[in-house]
Amino acid sequence: MAKVVVDPLTRIEGHLRIEVEVENDKVVEAHVIGTMYRGIEAMLRGRDPRDATYVTERVCGVCAGSHGWASSMALDKAFGANVPAGGRIIRNLIIGAMFLHDHPLHFYHLSALDYLDVMAVAKYQGKDPGLLAVKDKIVKLVVAGDTAPLTPRYKPDAFSVNDPELVTMAVAHYLKALEMQAKAKKMSALFAGKQPHQSSIVVGGVTMLPNIEVIEQFRSMLSEQLDFIEKIYLQDVLTFGTGPLLPLAQAGVGGGALNYMSYGGFARDNESKDLFFKAGLIMNGDLSNILPVDEKKITEDVQYSWYKASANGKTPYTEDTIPDLDKKGAYTFVKAPRYDAKPIEVGPLARMLIMQPKGLLDIIAKNNIKPGAVARHAARAYETLLLVKDMFTWLDALENEMGSKDFRIHDTEHWEAPVTGQGAGMTEVPRGSLGHFVKVADHKIENYQMVVPTTWNFSPRDDNGVRGPVEQALIGVPVPDLENPVNIVRVVRSYDPCLACAIHLIDPVTNDIKKFRIGW
């Protein structure tokens, strides 16, 4: 039996270490280890509740605005604030634009290099001027010995794409995606004030009063995003997923436990009865039985986490976040969220399996694709297309609201912190289901907890010894070459952490540590 250690797994919010044991060329044991203590919840105790929106924004600069959105939703409930339609729509547009930023970034810049033999670009023999320019640029970088960020990388394997035409096209789209990300972030900043770390979303609504010029500027860039997502991003994902990567897709490599959840997100009405992302729960892969989500069934275990067990209970409203670095048996700073004592996968695949859009289900059925790493990329791209189309209706709704005599963006009557209160902000963000939970006492934060998508997916074993979703997904993953464990990171990254810059392998014979530089 050989032990493989990936540490650190970079380009993520925080730090991640993956340890697996390999026997007969397959993973038989896995531990997912969060190696950084966050401490945001402890920092918030005793503060003005309105601080939470801006403090929690600093958890992550990648999923910009997500934590401020969820935090303000929790405060809305604790304060008794009623967000007017204008504020609700602008919040949706701020975060919706960040989905358009995050999803292509994940595919092109964080995951694609796991599947591409980038040096195949040098063999491109086509006539397309744009692709020839890409070839020329890459060849010059090779000659100069400076091919970052495309290298260093894992060695190509049996599933790597080495067709010069496909690879050159993918690298060209890699460059195009950088341009589109910048525009998506600018779109969000039009309503958010700035990105990352927006400054517009507050308890009760937003602070940005829109005008028609801003809306039309947003609409123009949204049209560009639709063209890119529909004609390039989604098509690339389908080309690879139903082509060279189809064996991985059909084998369901990295499938996991098949329990999925979505809180629902992007309300289209003030009562939150009509949600773009539907709320629901799937257990044991049964797509025919979408269950409702019950907030009361959410708990967090810490048996294998470096935290003291709370004497107050395991629910997000009652638990503590007190580090215990000497805790016997613990191996991570990530807690173990559970729904009704079950590990749950969250994210684009969960959302799409719960929404069940016909177009995506037809692609899955036609190609016999099973839940796994490739399916997560497909779900992420498909939901991006659905989202960008729906965002046009949000812009129209905002224009209609602006034309009404009682147009408002904020509930000013519920701005001051209450004496007591509590609330949960539960919504969907790029990586999955995000929940912020706050209790207010004497106008101050008494307790604050965040149960974030990465906590759900990258959780350790729970109090019953049951592995978290990524740990389960790694079991059975093929590792035919210990010197090149690319399938491990393919699975891990499909959940939307990010690319590793270093790998350490323990040789099963000598126990020597081998070090490999793995590309940006």
Image: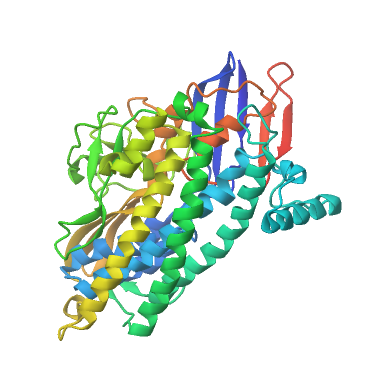
Look at the image and tell me whether residue 48 can be seen.
no
Instruction: Give the residue drawn at x 29%, y 44%.
Output: 357
Is 473 situated above or below 310? above
**Coordinates of residue 101 in the picture (x, y in percent):** 47, 60
Is 444 situated above or below 510? below
Is 504 left, or right, of 45 in this rendering?
Answer: right
**Coordinates of residue 199 in the picture (x, y in percent):** 40, 74
Instruction: Give the residue drawn at x 22%, y 55%.
Output: 275
Q: Residue furthest bottom?
A: 405
Q: Give the quadrant of residue 366.
A: top left
**Coordinates of residue 405 in the picture (x, y in percent):** 15, 86
Q: Residue furthest front?
A: 127
Depth check, front residue: 332 or 9: 9
Number of numbered markers: 0
Q: Give the quadrant of residue 214.
A: bottom left
Instruction: Give the residue drawn at x 36%, y 48%.
Output: 432
Q: Residue furthest top?
A: 24
Is 301 situated above or below 135? above
Depth check, front residue: 141 or 258: 141
Depth check, front residue: 165 or 9: 165
Look at the image and tell me whether residue 142 can be seen.
yes
Is 176 left, or right, of 221 in this rendering?
Answer: right
Is 130 left, or right, of 462 in this rendering?
Answer: right
